[in-house]
Image: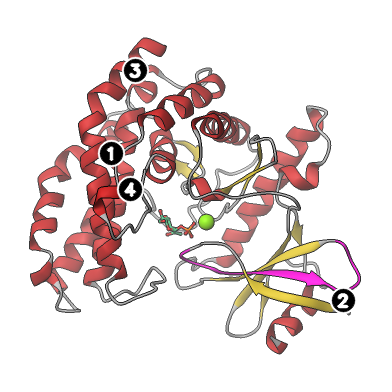
Amino acid sequence: MKELISIVNKFLQGAEVQEISVFGEGHINITYRVALKSEPKEYVLQKINHHIFKDVDLLQNNIKRITDHIRQKLADAGENDLERKTLTIILTLDEKLFYFDDENYWRMTLLIPEAKTFEAITPEYAFHAGKAFGNFQAMLADIPGEPLGETIPNFHNMESRLASFREAVKNDSAGRLIKVKDLVQEIEKRADEMCSCERLFREGKLPKRINHCDTKVNNMLFDESGKVLCVIDLDTAMPGFVMSDFGDFMRSAGNTGKEDDADLQNVSFNMEIFKSYTQGYLQEAKKFLSPIEVEMLPFGAKLITYMQVTRFLADYLNGDTYYKISFPEHNLQRTKAQFKLLQSIEEYYSEMLNYIAALV
Ligand code: GN1
Ligand code: MG
């Protein structure tokens, strides 16, 4: 606690801290909520996982550019209450975007008051979420200057994810391969199909656009009425394929169970969430998407769920070096739950394709 207070004081001079508590559900960074004694405002303090985000300068500069750009767009559109509709970065006392204490990297933002996050939502909320993520992609389409840097190189590149997965299988460094041979086979069976986006990109048939690249339902803040206030967790915003963002929302909000559900019977794909989200998303995004991007949205649901299966299983095989875990077999449980979801998505795949074809 004392250490954390001294970090807070690198950002807010002489701030008297009332309370600091662990906050949110993230698997990567460590996040705290900070309340001060004298101020109504609250803050979010994060220890950035710099083993994963190796270039913190690039990371923080990306986020600054994104939030500046969005704030300007909102202001131009006559919106008010901007501090609740985009993240506000708190600079350090010497006006830097993060503080480095010789070991760890820290950053602060304003905490957005009276906002809610959810792990599961209703179709009505999904419609608003679709609009919000569509609008997020639209707003970032004309961010000025250089293209945003890749904070994690090849982050949503399936070919490179498969290469890392195969490396993990080959090394079997935690000696766990024996337990997961069937899952490895299931992954290999689908490998070729799942690399379609990279092939289409090379053939010049599929563009890259700025994506959020972590459109989990819990990376969105909702207000009391179910409308989306603000998109958060901007760490991975970078160029990618639009169906990735579509797919990550389906993977999280479209799951009737939990990401790591121990009871696989709870896990299946929720078509109602798919339909509402698609309607909301296309309302905002139809104007800038090419026909192939629209057509491939359901593929995104398969792809990102499949990618998550490979990522969780690779981490399990590597001995849990990437994701935070809560118990020893957590990554295996996550893998199984995500694989069950993938199977359910596969069952609904043609229904999804038909739904979109009828909608456009
Ligand atoms: C991580 O940090 P968090 O929990 O929002 C991960 C995503 C995964 C997700 C799985 C930088 O997101 O890519 O899809 O866990 N972020 C990073 O829930 O790897
Ligand atoms: Mg997050």
Disc 4 crowd, CA 10 A, few/some/many (<14, 14-19, 20+): some
- Quarter of the image for the N terminus: give it: bottom right
Q: From the viewer's side, name the closer residue of 93 and 255.
A: 255
Q: Which residues are magenta?
A: 27-40
Q: Secondary structure at mark 2?
A: loop
Residue 94 at x, y percent in the picture: 81, 72
Question: Mark 4 or 2, which is nearer the eye?
Answer: 2
Q: Is mark 4 within 8 Å of ligand 1?
A: no
Disc 3/disc 1 C-alpha distance (Å)? 16 Å
Q: Which mark is residue 302?
A: 1
Residue at disc 2, CB closer than 8 Å to ligand 2: no
Tag 1: amino acid: Lys
| Residue corresponding to mark 4 | 157
Dividing the picture into quadrants, the one containing residue 79 is top right
Question: Residue at left 38%, top 38%?
Answer: 247
Q: Which residue is mark 2?
A: 13
Q: Earlier in the sequence, mark 4 or mark 3?
A: 4
Name which residue type carries label 4: Asn
Residue type at numbered disc 2? Gln
| Neighbours of disc 3 within 10 Å: few (<14), some (14-19), many (20+) | some
Per the model, the C-alpha gap separating discs 4 and 2 is 42 Å
Residue 184 visible here: yes
In the rendered structure, which amino acid carries the disc numbered 3? Tyr
Q: Residue, x 49% and y 65% (percent of image)?
A: 53
Marks 4 and 3, Cα distance to the nearest angstrom? 27 Å
Query: How many marks are shown on the rendered structure?
Result: 4
Q: Which mark is residue 355?
A: 3
Q: Nearer the viewer, mark 3 or mark 1?
A: 3
Q: Quadrant of residue 104?
A: bottom right
- Is mark 3 in CB contact (under 8 Å) with mark 2? no
